[in-house]
Image: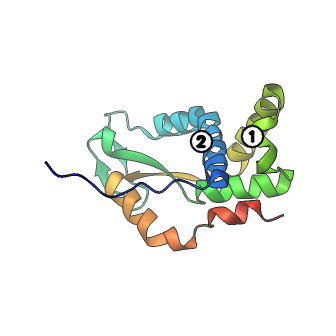
C-alpha cells in the first residue's frame, strides 16, 4: 500500500468567489445554450461543426462553444456594472437574481455561439488559454 504525500493546494478565497459567481452566470444562461444547440440540430439527428463543417454523428460529442470566451463575457459584465466581487456573497437573494437576469440579457445580446466537436473545443481551449484573463484581473478596480 502506497501512501500519497501529495497535498492538494487550496484555492485562493477570492478565486473561489469568482468561480462561484461564474458558475451562477453559467447556470443563468443554460437555457439559452440548450435552445441554441437545439436550433442547430439537423432533422436527421446530427450536428455540423461550425469550425470544419464536418458532420458530428454522435450528438453527445457536440459541444456549444463561445467565440468570445465566457470568462471574458463575465469580465466585461462585471466591469460595466461595477460589481464588487468581494460583496457578491453578502447581497440579498433578490439583488443577486436581478444581477443574474441582467447577465442573461447581456449574454443573449453579446455572445456568439458555435457548435464544435469535443476534440475541437478542447484544442480551441488549449491553444487560446494564454489569452484568457487571469482571475486576479477581476478584482482590479
Distance between the alpha carbons at the discs numbered 2 and 1? 16 Å
Residue at (75, 60) in percent of width and height? 139
Query: In the drawing, what numbered circle is on residue 65?
Result: none
Residue at (26, 54) in percent of width and height? 4
Label 2: few (<14), some (14–19) or many (≥20) C-alpha neighbours in 10 Å? few
Quarter of the picture containing the C terminus is bottom right
The x and y percentages for residue 89 are 75, 38
- Here the colouring is rainbow
Q: Is residue 98 visible?
A: yes
The x and y percentages for residue 40 are 46, 41
Q: Is residue 39 above or below residue 52?
A: above
* Image-based side of 100 in relation to 62, left or right: right
Per the image, label 1 sits on a secondary structure element best described as helix
Per the image, label 2 sits on a secondary structure element best described as helix
Where does label 2 land, which residue? 23
Q: Residue furthest top?
A: 94
The x and y percentages for residue 113 are 55, 51
* Image-based side of 28 in relation to 44, left or right: right
Q: Nearer the viewer, residue 29 or 48?
A: 29
Which quadrant of the figure has residue 76?
A: bottom right
Where does label 1 land, which residue? 105
Residue at (39, 56) in percent of width and height? 7
**Total numbered circles:** 2
Which quadrant of the figure has residue 28?
A: top right
Q: Earlier in the sequence, mark 2 or mark 1?
A: 2
Q: Nearer the viewer, residue 19 or 103?
A: 19
Q: Are marks 2 and 1 in contact (CB under 8 Å)?
A: no
Residue at (34, 52) in percent of width and height? 118
Q: Nearer the viewer, residue 63 or 76?
A: 76
Label 1: few (<14), some (14–19) or many (≥20) C-alpha neighbours in 10 Å? some
The x and y percentages for residue 34 are 51, 34
* Image-based side of 80 in relation to 53, left or right: right
Amino acid at each position: 500500500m502506497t501512501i500519497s504525500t501529495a497535498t492538494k493546494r487550496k484555492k485562493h478565497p477570492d478565486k473561489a468567489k469568482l468561480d462561484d459567481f461564474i458558475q451562477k452566470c453559467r447556470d443563468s444562461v443554460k437555457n439559452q445554450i440548450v435552445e441554441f444547440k437545439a436550433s442547430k440540430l439537423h432533422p436527421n439527428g446530427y450536428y455540423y461543426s461550425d469550425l470544419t463543417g464536418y458532420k458530428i454523428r454522435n450528438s453527445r460529442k457536440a459541444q456549444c462553444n463561445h467565440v468570445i470566451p465566457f470568462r471574458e463575457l463575465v469580465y466585461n459584465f462585471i466591469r460595466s456594472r461595477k460589481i464588487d466581487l468581494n460583496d457578491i456573497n453578502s447581497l440579498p437573494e433578490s439583488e443577486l437574481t436581478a444581477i443574474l437576469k441582467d447577465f442573461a440579457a447581456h449574454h443573449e445580446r453579446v455572445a456568439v455561439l458555435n457548435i464544435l466537436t469535443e476534440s475541437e473545443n478542447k484544442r480551441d481551449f488549449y491553444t487560446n488559454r494564454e489569452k484568457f484573463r487571469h482571475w486576479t484581473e477581476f478584482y482590479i478596480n
